[in-house]
Image (cartoon, rainbow, N blue to C red):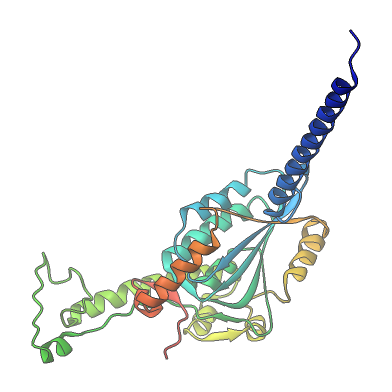
Amino acid sequence: MALDADSLFDRRRLKRHLTLWRLLALGALAALAVIYAGRFDGPPLLGGDYVARLSVDGIIFDDEDRTQAIAALAERDDVRGLIVKVDSPGGTFVGGEALFEALRKVAARIPTVAVMGGTATSAGYMVAIATDHVIARRGTLTGSIGVILQTADVTELLGKLGIKPEVFKSGPMKAQPNPLEPLSPAAREATQDVLMELYGQFVDMVAERRDMPRDKVLALADGRVYSGRGAKENGLIDAIGAEDTARAWLESTHGVPADLPVREIEYGEEPLPWRDALSSQLQKALFSERLRLDGVFSLWHPSL
């Protein structure tokens, strides 16, 4: 049966609408592909080899999501190398130790290189020396090899306020040091012994990774910080430079092409800028960062 003019017009209009919707759908898919690719600083949908980048910023704590993300790199055949960007004053000893061990396991599989930012001290330095090659800027602050535990005795202050704390515990060494009671000589000695044990572990890490006599490390590990240039002169790092220096080293030493894309390692929750900003402001308003530093730290935190 022949179609009249109105039917032909309606059919053609329907085809145009279908074509438009198909184009819009294809455009949406393309936009999603671009967004997805952008998260990895490279074209993951196209496959191919790449260099991974891990950013270690701020105070270092033990992070299981980060540890698992690092471990996963060793299982991939398309990861040709790992760049670890460190800009941290340090953190907990356990946090630095966990990162150190995770990076050493990856280094057995792929070449690794650390690039220090403005600060890479204490546990931040511990993380950097876990890699095969350590690079810093001339003005980078690094070193501060050591551990610290801070406490306070507020009993005299409380006494002036008419407050007398009572502490019940199973033994004299329990909960020591404790701001609510004076530190006994035995507790002071025991606490110092623990710190020196951890300090010795840190010194051994440096001696092994920097291929340096332990006596020399001890001379350098008095807690002082070094500039990048000073660290290079003392054998604490390998080179002065930045990420392009790291790429050049990967290429010249391990044959990793300098034009391979770099993809940032992502782990944990999806970042939400508004939530992170709100959380940061609340923490600043409610707590001083110095007050939040509790426990045994390998941290460079200059006094005010």
**Which residue is nearer to you in this view: 289 or 257?**
289
Residue in view at x 77 percent, y 36 percent: 21
**Which residue is nearer to you in this view: 168 or 7?**
7
Q: What number of labels is visible?
A: 0
Q: Horizontal placement of 293 versus 13: left or right?
A: left
Residue in view at x 53 percent, y 83 percent: 220
Task: Say which quarter of the image contains residue 251.
Answer: bottom right
Rendering coords of residue 273 (x, y %)? 55, 63
Task: Say which quarter of the image contains residue 27.
Answer: top right
**Which residue is nearer to you in this view: 154 or 73?**
154
- The quadrant the N terminus occupies is top right
Can residue 150 be seen from the camera position used here?
Answer: yes
Rendering coords of residue 288 (x, y %)? 38, 79
Q: Horizontal placement of 174 versus 90: left or right?
A: left
Can residue 268 be seen from the camera position used here?
Answer: no
Residue in view at x 47 percent, y 63 percent: 97
Task: Say which quarter of the image contains residue 245.
Answer: bottom right
Residue in view at x 43 percent, y 68 percent: 93
Rendering coords of residue 246 (x, y %)? 74, 67
